[in-house]
Amino acid sequence: VRRRCPRSWEVEAARDGRLVGEDRERLVRHLAQCPSCARESRSLDAVSAALRSLPDFRENEVSLRRLKQRILRRVDAQLVGRSTKSPRHHWRAAAALALAATLLTFGVHRAVHSPELLDPTVDVVETPGASWTRRIDHEAERVILRSGTLHFKVRRAPGGKRFVVRVPDGEIEDLGTMFAVTVALNRTRLVIVDEGQVTLRLADGRTVDLASGQSWEPGPTSTAAPPAADATSPPVVASFDAVESAPPSEIPRRVAPAPRPQAPAVPSTSVAAGEDVAYLNVLRLLRTGQTAEARAAARDYLRAFPKGFRRPEVARVAEGR
Amino acid sequence: MTSRPLYLVPVSSASPDGCALRRVAEGNVGALGEVYERHVHVLLRFAARVAGPDNAEDIVQATFVRAAKVAATYDDRAASGRAWLLGIAARLVQERRRSLVRLSRALLRLGAEARASCAPPQTHPSDIEKGLRRLSDAKRVVLVLAEVEGFSCDEIARMLQVPVGTVWTRLHHARRELRQYYGEDA
């Protein structure tokens, strides 16, 4: 039975630009001594070579000319169609634009002067074991996340209610988007924005704006010192006191967590990106010698991504092997 | 010591593709022919690998037609339009697959053998081609862009407008599935 080197994942990581600088140089030295990693490298080279050796598409000059003519004719027809629109068409477009502007102004006016703001439409998908509640008041809809990971897809009407995710160490305000939040050990561990924009306000006064494709995770100092308060302690952010004090029974939990098979509400890209970030966080902590924090992060990963493809490596870290 | 002011000399930084696509955006269809001549071979090769040789010309045609439509959005500071065109082609492959799936479902509802009629006739593909075809479109596109076209993961992420972590994940799964197909230890 061939023994697999625990560092063999680094071969692919270096290939994809995930391993750089000193780490990469260390791997190069390691490759010269480790038959398992050398085998992994050869195997990846073989896949790459096989893909490059696929026969090229057989094209001939005549078919290429024909294709070019077809494309240019098609694009030409498209342009002609665009430019031969009659002046009457422009008047119609202008009238439609004016009507839309009027309706929009009317809608905004109603939204501003209406005593009841429109509720945002929110799809929530929870990972198993997530602990959270939802509260609604006259100006905002809030999700209080105590632990675990939630994915949100939020559609807000212009001038409608705010949507805020309360986490133990701050709050995240959504500006109409899709995003995911992970909380563990009374700390926000990860925020990933898939579309749109969110603003993260931390209890220590820091504010972080995250746009589409960006993620946030706490620095080493904040992971090293989790707050003493437990999940049921009073909130850190004072502005939430009033909301927190309301008995949960008065406000029903209106959004039932979506069952796993209905997950399409959240794109798989955010889950994959979240998994990557969580895994890279474990590695970073290990490399900086923060073993206890790395174990905690590994346990978070295993909870958040029970079927994650880095599960075997992360399980070893979590068990301290 | 005397100090002399520095002047910025205005130069045209647009690449040949940038100039041509700007003219396309202004309505000059002939300029699209220049872009076609420069990139048609790469696009045909890419389309044949990710969508099959029978669909390659259709994908390339749709790519140039869409490129002409959105030519005004091209950033002409880029050295070449290759990555931009490949990004359009990659998205078209995925859109096309979705519409084929919808068509298959519609035909199945009518009781027809949709899958058989939709699938293009295959001519003895090699093992690596078979393995490649078993991958999902998303994974195949990323694998071909990285291993055949030689783009970095960051470049692919920009082309496909997805986070770089997603590219790493798709690439890892694609390689693993391909290696598993050959019976290797992934």
Image: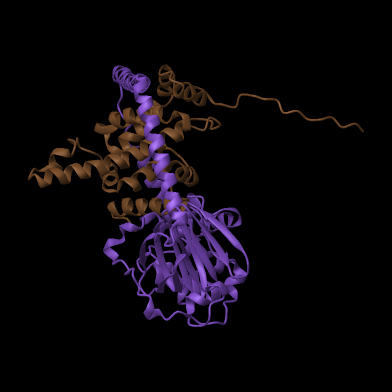
When the figure is inspected, residue B54 is found, relative to residue B145, above or below; the finding is above
Image coordinates of residue A272 in percent, x first then y, are 40, 58
- Chain A drawn colour: purple
Q: Is residue B145 above or below residue A277?
A: above
B159 versus A74 height, above or below:
below
Residue A73, percent across and down?
A: 32, 18
Report the front residue among B10 and B127. B10
Question: Which residue is at the far right?
Answer: B1
x then y, percent, for residue A292: 54, 76
Could you tell me which residue is drawn at 42 percent across and 60 percent down? Answer: A117
| Residue that appears at 17% across and 39% down | B118
Quadrant of the snapshot with the N terminus of chain B: top right
How far across and down, in percent of the image, does residue A266 sit?
36, 58
Q: Is residue A198 above or below residue B57?
A: below
Chain B drawn colour: brown
Residue drawn where x is 30% and y is 41% of the image: B95
